[in-house]
Image (tube, rainbow, N blue to C red):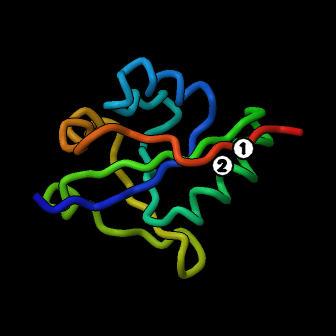
Amino acid sequence: MRTTTLWRPTGPAELALVRASGMRAWPPRLPEQPIFYPVLNEDYAIRIARDWNVKHDGAGYVTRFAVAADFLARYPVRQAGGETILELWVPAEELPEFNVHLVGPIEVVREFHAA
């Protein structure tokens, strides 16, 4: 099976829910979060975790995970800014199915904390 590696910057609250799943699933979105945004490169995830999550949550984490490539084909790559600011937009109601197509665990690969 071909997989695609994705990253997600996250704060402490979301990471606690991921850990509660055994690092196997992303939690449901909150009502004000209609889209789940995994990103396609680690550098973009680092910038968000370091510059946004730390400022708003006191800590930011970069996670890495693999998803079945055939399944991801339904989500076009979105350019959210510069050339390397690439993400997928997964509607909140599709997140349970998205989680079924994760291959292996979600891993924390970087963390940042307020000074």
Q: Please name which of the two marks, 1 or 2, marks the residue nearer to the observer.
A: 1
Residue at the outermost left position:
1
Q: Is disc 1 placed on a helix, strand or loop?
A: strand
Name the residue at 77% across, 38% down: 113
Q: Is disc 2 placed on a helix, strand or loop?
A: helix
* Identity, as a three-letter code, of the amino acid under mark 2: Ala
Residue 22's x, y, as percent?
A: 36, 23
**Disc nearer the start of the sequence (1/2):** 2
The answer to whether one can see residue 97 in this image is yes
On the image, numbered disc 1 is attached to which residue?
A: 112
Q: Distance between the residues labelled 1 and 2?
A: 7 Å
Query: Mark 2 packing: few (<14 Cα in 10 Å), some, or many (20+)?
Result: many
Circle number at residue 49: 2
The answer to whether one can see residue 74 in this image is no
94 or 9, which is in the foreground?
A: 9
Is 61 situated left or right of 102 in this image?
A: right
Examine the image and state in which quarter residue 47 appears. bottom right
* The C terminus sits in image quarter: top right
- Is 9 located above or below residue 13 in the figure? below
Is 85 situated left or right of 96 in this image?
A: right
Query: Mark 1 packing: few (<14 Cα in 10 Å), some, or many (20+)?
Result: some
* Identity, as a three-letter code, of the amino acid under mark 1: Phe
Name the residue at 83% across, 38% down: 114
Residue 4's x, y, as percent?
A: 28, 61
Residue 50's x, y, as percent?
A: 72, 51
The reply to whether discs 1 and 2 touch (Cβ–Cβ < 8 Å) is yes
Residue 85's x, y, as percent?
A: 54, 70
Residue at the outermost bottom position:
83
